[in-house]
Image (cartoon, helix red, strand yellow):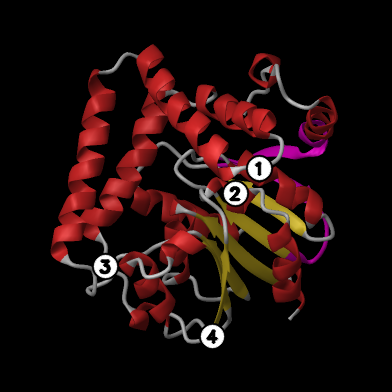
Amino acid sequence: MKYNEEYFEFADKDKLADFKQFINSVEYKKYDDMNYIEGGSGSTLLLYIPSTNGNGMVFYEYFKEFNEYRNIAVSYINASLEEQVDKIIHFINTLEYEKIYLIGYSFGGIIAQLVLRNFSAIDGVILMDTETKTEGIHPKLVKKNIKSYKRLIRSLKYLSEKRTYKSLKKSIEYDVKVGIENHQHFYEGLYTNILYSSTKEEIKSNFKKVLEFHQHYIIKKSDFNDFHSKVLFLNPNYTKGRIENEELLELFDKKEVVYYDISSRLGLVNLKISFNKIKEFLKG
């Protein structure tokens, strides 16, 4: 993400100064065609996978909070979902660590599931407001999801770049308004900056990954037979009873589930009360 001051015009000055210090201290790196940021230190690695905005910068609060760990947040590549998963696995194989934890947010949690079923040597997984697709999901719901993302991708095809950004920016404004209590102007600026740092093709590619998942993947409990570590689920209250979320919980035997009274999934990425639970999980 290329920092642009204009998106943070109304942000709290102290919060913005803190963020500027972060972006000047974090390392910007690349593995093949995959960008990632790295910070912190230690023999335990926390590997973060973002949602469909595809940018690891959304985890900046986590980098600061868990600075005693080695933090790496990957960004999406302009390729298929299968290629994205393979890229992350190959990347992990190049890294040195004593322990490794996957942290997936929203669709990043789906990518984490696909990584895990092909690379089980993980010491723990944290999934935030994530769902899955199993044989237990009704075909009508699957078709509905496919139709929705096909429509979205098709609309992007015909929208100009300017209108694409404008449409997605409205979604950011709404999500921040209902999902984040503190520093709304800052987070609106952050997500807007991430949006405008992405090309239209990259945006389409990210949504195509979601479509590919709903079209071609089925996750089974047997996919994780070789995975024996624990999973921590951090979910908004409104996901209780939702079949995609309930099916995900059934995939893992060793798990802890925590629900938070928040109105939007954006709150999870910036929800500091979840940090203590994550710390317990990492030390347990």
Residue at the spot of label 4:
254
Query: What is the crowding at mark 1: few (fewer than 14 residues within 10 Å), some, or many (at least 20)?
Result: few
| Amino acid marked by disc 3 | Ile
- Front label number (3 vs 2): 2
The numbered dot on residue 267 is: 2
Which residue is painted at 56% across and 26% down in the image?
192
Please give left or right for residue 72 compared with residue 233 in the image: right
User: Earlier along the polypeptide chain: callout 2 or callout 4?
Assistant: 4
- Front label number (1 vs 4): 1
The foreground one among 170 and 111 is 170
Residue at the spot of label 1:
181
Establish if 206 lies above or below 130.
above
Query: What is the crowding at mark 3: few (fewer than 14 residues within 10 Å), some, or many (at least 20)?
Result: some
| Amino acid marked by disc 1 | Glu
Query: What is the crowding at mark 4: few (fewer than 14 residues within 10 Å), some, or many (at least 20)?
Result: few
| Amino acid marked by disc 4 | Lys
Residue 39 among magenta residues: yes
Assess whether mark 2 and mark 1 are in contact (beta carbons under 8 angstroms): yes
The N terminus lies in quadrant: top right
Residue at the spot of label 3:
218
Query: What is the crowding at mark 2: few (fewer than 14 residues within 10 Å), some, or many (at least 20)?
Result: many
Please give left or right for residue 54 compared with residue 144 in the image: right
- Front label number (1 vs 2): 1
Establish if 174 lies above or below 90.
above
Residue 206 in the image: state x and y as whole percent: 39, 39
The magenta segment is: 22-44
User: Earlier along the polypeptide chain: callout 1 or callout 3?
Assistant: 1
Q: CA distance from mark 1 to mark 2?
A: 8 Å
- Front label number (3 vs 4): 4
Which residue is painted at 35% across and 66% down in the image?
242
Q: CA distance from mark 1 to mark 4?
A: 32 Å
Q: Secondary structure at mark 3?
A: loop
